[in-house]
Image (spheres, rainbow, N blue to C red):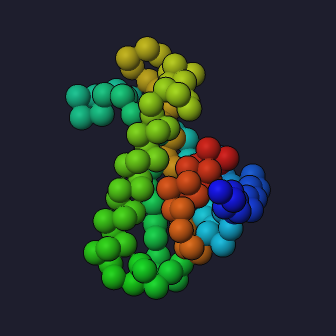
Amino acid sequence: LPQPERRATHVHAAAIGAAHGSATARLGQTSAVAGVRAEVTEASPDFPLSEHVMVTVDLPPMCSTAFRDRHASAGAATFLARSVGDVLNSGHVLDSAQLRVREGELSWVLHLHVVCLNYDGNAFDMCLLAAVAA
């Protein structure tokens, strides 16, 4: 069987000057920008520092007609944010020990925000690529 063509992939780091880390990613015609803001956070019963990367994903109506319905867009964005967050917090991508300032007391928390600019499929791959590059 013939192999399907792979989508062209492009990544550019340092896309947003005000962010601690950022990148744009493009997979074929699907593109996104991701920005990271880092802050030191104190452990508390409400925030036990088990997740060091907090992810939000925006799928605005301008990126695709598929996201003109707010409910569909919000559901897909929530699913993508949780999925990308699960991967980044799993320990296979990012070693959370490197983010600890004082064991059990203080830790760096990374707030990652991904915005889809154009959607043509592969939203998860595009979000994860932009997130890791940022």
Q: Position of residue 40 (x, y in %)?
A: 49, 33
Tell me what residue is drawn at x 37 percent, y 72 percent. 73
Residue placed most toward the observer, 112 or 72: 72
Tell me what residue is drawn at x 32 percent, y 78 percent. 70
Q: Position of residue 17 (x, y in %)?
A: 72, 57
Q: Is residue 34 visible?
A: no
Residue 100 versus residue 37 in the image, above or below: above
Tell me what residue is drawn at x 37 percent, y 49 percent. 82
Give the position of the N terminus as an image quadrant: bottom right
Q: Position of residue 39 (x, y in %)?
A: 51, 39
* 61 relative position to 134: left or right: left
* 16 relative position to 81: left or right: right
Residue placed most toward the observer, 15 or 3: 3
Q: How many marks?
A: 0
Q: Position of residue 96 (x, y in %)?
A: 50, 25
Tell me what residue is drawn at x 50 percent, y 81 percent. 64
